[in-house]
Image: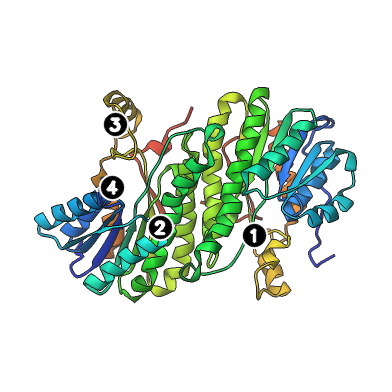
């Protein structure tokens, strides 16, 4: 375990006992940091989880750690491809219980100043983060509408509010997700469905370590650079996501909820 | 108080609405203005109107969603005037569709112009703007990029994306002295939304200021951001919406 400690197991204190039994949730980016902890928390709470991720190998590895194979439906695919997204939601439908939630956590990252950013690099990030969120939210809303119940959580970022040097595509995609989620929430609210975005600051996941030339000391300093001064784990974020999916947040929709140790978001 | 004599500006979407009003107002303040529009005849008409009023203007036809085309337009403006000081990335389109009915083509079309187009435009102009002593980038977002709007999820996503892009650019370009800001207009009477007179009256009546915006209302804010008065203002998103954002939503 690295310094700071990755806590994959959620305490699940925000979920009512039995709330998630016989309910299905789709999680994209399921084998990544936040997605992986969210899947673990949902399985612990009793939900059936469609774990959607680009990498079959990563899903296999995560599935071994998650346990609960009876309630886990791993699907390998690309959130930027409508056909792959349709495949994941077909698996969710085949479970035979209403789709209760979507966690659109699939996201990628990259570094380049705008002047040197190629069209390909711009589109690589926008396609997965923003278009992928659109495609998965569209599929989830379509599945949930007939049941007049369901909650969607999308992944924005602190960087949507603060901008980011050399990650303008990432910040643009995340600010786009925030506004998209508000628009979606207004559309689905009359049907009893909710959508919220969360805006995490630096979280102890592989993502902040994925940029070239970042030492572990630098990453840890970044992770601690918040008023609370602690390193946030993926499980901290999963707790918020489960709350936003749960009945406890019945009157919360169209919001961007920051989880960043105390940074201002304006 | 605002004098842009000697400055060169390039405005995309200059053929109509906010872009056209902005091009004319920048011209009135003394700037030389490149009027870029996807429709050549509209670019020509806007530049002709500017010249009729005695301003120095150039018409350029380019689709901002085509990186080669907007790159060539920026190069033409540079070749004509030898520099660039003010970029107004304003071109935008919209359509109306709920997410559950929206096909990928509708999504991709709006994102290509409203978000990708801003990126291509800014990237093409950056080397010249860095050379300016008064570098300014102003992007037209929308208040829906902040608050979202039903039926406009793609447009909201694109305009929200512009806001994230603007904040990042402000960080990257601060050391070069280039300011980067966004305006976030509310309901403005432009060609982008079709409304009946009845809808216009009803929408206006709900606004705190009691009227819809005119393109000139937004152009005035862009002119301010382009001027020396706004030299210490960067990375901001300025809603300009007659107070619409204060209203509750149902």
Compared with B44, B84 (above or below) is below
Quadrant of res B232:
bottom left
The location of residue A23, given as percent across then percent down, is 78, 31
Observer-side mark, 3 or 1, equals 3
Question: Between marks 2 and 3, how big is the CA–CA gap?
Answer: 39 Å
> Is A214 placed left or right of B240 in the picture?
right
Q: Which residue is mark 4?
A: B18
Q: Are marks 2 and 4 on the same chain?
A: yes
Q: Is residue B236 something that shows in the picture?
A: no
At x 72% / y 53%, what residue is drawn?
Answer: A54
Q: Secondary structure at mark 2?
A: loop
Chain at numbered mark 4? B
- Please name which of the two marks, 4 or 1, marks the residue nearer to the observer: 4
Crowding near the residue tagged with mark 1, few <14, some 14–19, many ≥20 C-alpha atoms within 10 Å: few
Kindly report which numbered mark, 2 or 3, lies closer to the viewer in this rendering: 2
Q: How far, Cα to Cα, is label 2 from label 1?
A: 44 Å
Element assignment for label 3: loop
Instruction: Measure the alpha-carbon separation of dots 2 and 4.
Output: 21 Å
Using the image, name the chain to which the residue with label 1 belongs: A
The chain to which mark 2 is attached is: B
Disc ID at residue B210: 3
Query: In this rendering, which labeled residue sits more in front, label 2 or label 4?
Result: 2
Residue B173, given in percent of the width and then of the height, sits at: 43, 69
Query: B100 or A105, which is in the foreground?
Result: B100
What residue does disc 2 label? B66
Q: Disc 4 or disc 3, which is closer to the eye?
A: 4
Q: Does residue B142 show up?
A: yes
Q: Secondary structure at mark 4?
A: helix
């Amino acid at each position: 375990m690295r310094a700071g400690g990755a806590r994959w197991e959620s305490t699940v204190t925000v979920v009512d006992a039995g709330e998630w039994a016989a309910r299905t949730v789709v999680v994209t980016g399921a084998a990544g940091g936040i997605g992986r902890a969210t899947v673990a928390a949902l399985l612990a709470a009793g939900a059936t989880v469609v774990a959607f991720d680009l990498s079959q190998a990563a899903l296999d590895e995560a599935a071994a750690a998650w346990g609960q194979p009876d309630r886990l439906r791993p699907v390998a695919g690309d959130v930027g491809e409508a056909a792959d997204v349709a495949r994941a939601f077909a698996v969710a439908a085949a479970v035979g219980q209403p789709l209760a939630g979507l966690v659109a956590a699939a996201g990628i990252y990259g570094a380049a100043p705008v002047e040197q950013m190629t069209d390909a690099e711009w589109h690589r990030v926008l396609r997965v983060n923003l278009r992928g969120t659109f495609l998965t939210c569209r599929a989830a809303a379509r599945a949930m509408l007939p049941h007049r119940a369901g909650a969607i959580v999308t992944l924005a970022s602190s960087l949507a509010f603060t901008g980011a040097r050399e990650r303008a595509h990432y910040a643009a995609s995340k600010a786009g997700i925030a506004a998209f989620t508000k628009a979606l929430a207004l559309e689905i609210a009359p049907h009893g469905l909710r959508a919220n975005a969360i805006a995490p600051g630096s979280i102890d996941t592989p993502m902040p370590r994925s940029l070239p030339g970042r030492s572990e000391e630098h990453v840890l300093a970044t992770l601690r650079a918040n008023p609370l001064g602690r390193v946030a784990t993926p499980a901290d974020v999963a707790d918020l996501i489960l709350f936003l999916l749960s009945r406890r947040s019945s009157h919360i929709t169209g919001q961007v909820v920051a989880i960043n140790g105390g940074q201002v978001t304006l | 108080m605002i004098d842009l004599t000697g400055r060169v500006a390039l405005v995309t979407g200059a053929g109509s609405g906010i872009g056209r009003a902005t091009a004319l107002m920048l011209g009135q303040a003394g700037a030389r203005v490149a009027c870029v529009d996807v429709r050549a005849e509209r670019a020509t008409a806007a530049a002709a109107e500017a010249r009729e009023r005695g301003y120095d203007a150039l018409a350029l036809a380019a689709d901002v969603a085509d990186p080669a085309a907007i790159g060539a337009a920026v190069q033409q403006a540079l070749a004509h005037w030898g520099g660039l000081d003010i970029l107004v990335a304003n071109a935008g389109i919209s359509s109306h569709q709920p997410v559950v009915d929206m096909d990928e083509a509708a999504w991709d079309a709006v994102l290509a112009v409203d978000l990708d187009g801003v990126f291509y435009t800014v990237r093409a102009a950056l080397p010249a703007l860095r050379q300016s002593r008064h570098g300014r980038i102003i992007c037209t977002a929308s208040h829906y990029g902040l608050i979202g709007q039903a039926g406009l999820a793609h447009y909201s996503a694109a305009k929200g994306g512009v806001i994230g892009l603007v904040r990042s650019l402000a960080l990257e370009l601060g050391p070069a002295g280039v300011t980067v800001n966004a305006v976030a207009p509310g309901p403005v009477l432009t060609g982008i939304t079709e409304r009946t007179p009845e809808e216009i009256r009803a929408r206006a009546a709900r606004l705190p200021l009691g009227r819809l915006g005119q393109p000139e209302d937004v152009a005035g804010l862009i002119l301010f951001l382009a001027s020396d008065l706004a030299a210490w203002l960067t990375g901001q998103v300025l809603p300009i919406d007659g107070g619409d954002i204060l209203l509750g939503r149902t």
